[in-house]
Amino acid sequence: KDDRGRRHFTLKARTGTSTLIPGKKTPTWGINGPFLGPTLRARRGDTVSVAFTNGLPETTTLHWHGMHLPAEFDGGPHQAVAPGEVWRPSWRLDQPAATLWYHPHPHGKTADHVTRGIAGLFLIEDEHSQDAGLPHTYGVDDVPLILQDRAFHDDGSLSLRGVSFMEELAGAGSLGVLGDNIFVNGTHNPHLKVTTRLLRLRVLNGSNARVYNLGLTDGRSFHLVAQESGLLSNPLRMRRLQLAPAERAEIVVPFEPGEKVVLRSYPPDLGVGFPNGRLDGGEDTFDLIQFRAGKTLRGSGEVPGKLPGAPEPPTAPGSAHRRYFELSGIQINGRSMDMNRIDQVAPARAVELWDVQGIDGVPHSFHVHGTSFSVVSYGGRPVPARLRGLKDTVYLRPQETVRLAVPMPEHVDPATPYMFHCHMLKHEDQGMMGQFTVV
Ligand code: C2O
Ligand code: CU
Ligand code: CU
């Protein structure tokens, strides 16, 4: 519903049946449909309200990943919605234009609920984003790509990847069993007809554990124009883009009339040695989607060299409070997630320096709720250009320390925590998560 300055979304999670692989019926979950959920769109300054009905047979939650909002509306493990109940969060959108997403977050069951199909995008526009010179007609030259891998049983049902002893024997890596069927917006092997010279792709790695390394099969370059949490002031030309679970990026790809080209995932550089690199998907290649350009294409082929309205990434003062997060053995700082323990307490709005390190030789994808951060250093080195800009999730190569400048949320609530955790969902579910409150 679209009233001036107000956006209301009526969402209902439900069970259903989908044809995900040819000839098989798969029991799935979705929002307002049998599989995945609608793209929600709103503008900075809008007041958003949601009526979320849980029509599933299990308690779940709906988390607004990347959203700056009060902890009580965050949709983390504390905002449980029992079957048949309705949850009504409401908040004022006050953050830069970005490609966010939503997904369930019930403690211990996130991987299961996301795999079954509860996930969708939440696009924020602001006063700059639609006249930045970037393609912005949704579904025409501004297209979301939700990348997810899934594994199936012979009867067509989804493998929910709780790693059993048998699966371990069969060669699951440290991330659990990766799926060999890749879905783009819920479709296997899709193609897209391109009608413009520039195509903007809002890519979400919505997978539980798989890392993608995106490139076009003819080697053409594209521009990175946004990170998870906002546009980049200087679009960056590149040929390969690696995305860890929950990372997003917006890229702009050029086309000539009549061309066909495939977006492929090449073997990602996980920073993990043999044999784990192989078990964790470090040698996998997948074709994701084919683009077919029309005989005549509209628009110009020019990507703006600068995006004037892009947000300034946060910097921390010399006196910034420092925190250290060591990820190992599915714990953070030697502790497993406990819903009743607050791990960190921080003053509202302060920009802190967080050093995050995985020390167990396993890949991790570190995410903080309720805010957007910038990467200050990566593995002790200056930040690679690809990681500049506003982010909310960052890949951790084993052993390397990543330093983040993290502005604390402005919403004070000593009683309700935000989460920080590994977004490899098996790790998260097993307890690699902690809680912070803002006071
Ligand atoms: Cu994408 Cu704690 O979540
Ligand atoms: Cu989140
Ligand atoms: Cu992890």
Image (tube, rainbow, N blue to C red):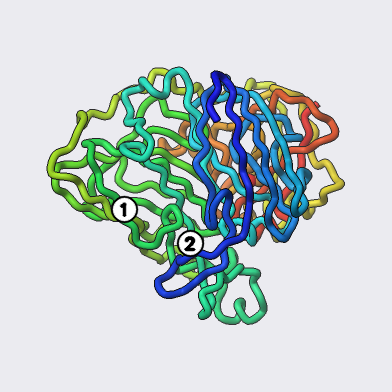
- Vertical position of residue 376 compared to residue 38: above or below: above
Sort mark 1 into few (<14), some (14-19) or many (20+) by Cα contacts within 10 Å.
some
Q: Is mark 1 within 8 Å of ligand 1?
A: no
In which quadrant will I find the N terminus? top right
Instruction: Check disc 2 and report the residue beneath it.
Output: 149
Point out which mark residue 263 bears: 1
Q: CA gap, disc 1 to disc 2?
A: 15 Å
Element assignment for label 1: strand
Q: Residue at x 61, y 48 (%)?
A: 103
Tell me: residue 304, above or below residue 228. Answer: above
On screen, residue 424 versus residue 238, left or right, reads: right
Residue 438 x/y as whole percent: 77, 29
Residue 251 picture location, percent across and down: 36, 39
| Residue 293 in sight from this viewpoint | yes
- Given residues 379 and 331, the one toward you in this image is 331
As shown in the figure, which amino acid type bears the numbered disc 2? Asp
Q: Residue at x 36, y 22 (%)?
A: 132
- Is the CB of mark 2 within 8 Å of ligand 3? no
Q: Amino acid at mark 1?
A: Leu
Q: Residue sitting at 61 percent across and 69 percent down?
A: 161
